[in-house]
Image (cartoon, rainbow, N blue to C red):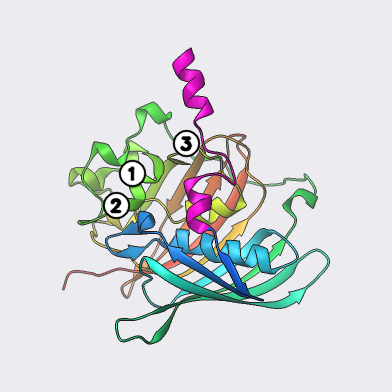
Amino acid sequence: MAEAATAQAARATIGDSEFDRDTAVTLREPGVYGIDLSAGWTIVNAVNGGYLLAVLGRALGDALPHRDPFTVSAHYLTASRPGPAVIRTDVVRAGRTLSTGQASLFQYDDEGNEVERIRVLASYGDLDSLPDDVRTSAKPPAIPPPDRCFGPEDGPAPVSGSSAITDRLELRLDPATLGWALGSPSGKGEMRAWFGLADGRDADPLSLLLAVDALPPTAFELGISGWVPTVELTVHVRCRPAPGPLRVSITTRNLAGGFLEEDAEVWDSTDRLVAQSRQLARVRLAS
């Protein structure tokens, strides 16, 4: 009992966690923010796209009169690296219920040239002001209990090389979507998992921007290995998630011309659909 109480007390909280520290931005001048992108959220040498979205989402939440992301659309222009970055924001419209802004993240390349890494257009509002009226045909994904699912420690690394982000997450993958790890991909283009942050921090609207892009790519279950870089990612945050683990379901129905889409749903512990996303990603097909 004492050990359980100690573990519970050690859980990180919203606002005081590794995720919050690593997405924190510093206001340099009106609309301009600085940050050191953490190497802890990388896959190989590139910074994870969901982490980047959360970073820009935090900057926009500070720049806009509303704090909660409702819809965020990002175009990934060049691969971001750990280290210093500058975020420039612009308030497009400040409305009574929704405010819209845009933001871009910049870094310097090896020659000292400023390079835009990612550009975002987003609308923010107040999730707590939304009516509690849900009419949906969507159903939570059927995932076995966490103790019957598998974590990164149970199999090979999804991508050869560093995968530091896996140490920041508590992922338990549905065995039905793990054929790729056994050399027998299903060909269905599906990935499902329980999702949480490794330090126990509960989910909030900002961390949902990470959750939609934190699982192994569905391309693995299509028999394609290697890095699958994001071209465009749009996230809709539908409500504030309840405490507890999230369930994430991602599907791909069409791979063509070296690109595929990924549709994600995120469900909270009360079986509420709290976020949806669509992503366009590039795959490197064997020649």
Q: The disc labelled 2 sits on which kind of residue?
A: Glu
Name the element at disc 1. Answer: helix
Q: Position of residue 265 (x, y in %)?
A: 53, 50
Does 129 appear in magenta?
no
Name the element at disc 3. Answer: loop
Callout 1 touching callout 2 (CB < 8 Å): yes
Q: Is residue 237 above or below residue 282?
A: above
Q: The disc labelled 1 sits on which kind of residue?
A: Thr
* Label placed on residue 74: none
Q: Residue at x 26, y 38 (%)?
A: 153
Q: Residue 37: name its quadrant.
A: bottom left
Query: Label 1 neighbourhood size at 10 Å, few (<14), some (14-19), many (20+)?
Result: many
The first of marks 3 and 2 along the sequence is 3
Residue bearing mark 3: 142
* Label placed on residue 177: 1
The first of marks 3 and 1 along the sequence is 3
Q: Which residues are magenta?
A: 1-23
Indicate left or right for 203 with 67 as reference. left
Alpha carbon of mark 1 to alpha carbon of mark 2: how far? 7 Å
Residue bearing mark 2: 221
Indicate left or right for 243 with 179 as reference. right
Q: The disc labelled 3 sits on which kind of residue?
A: Ala
Q: Is residue 24 above or below residue 85?
A: above
Seen from the viewer's position, the closer of residues 219 and 122 is: 122
The first of marks 1 and 2 along the sequence is 1
Seen from the viewer's position, the closer of residues 136 and 272 is: 272
Q: Residue 41: name its quadrant.
A: bottom left
Q: Is residue 252 above or below residue 27?
A: above
Q: Residue at x 23, y 59 (%)?
A: 225
Q: Position of residue 172 (x, y in %)?
A: 38, 37
Callout 3 touching callout 1 (CB < 8 Å): no
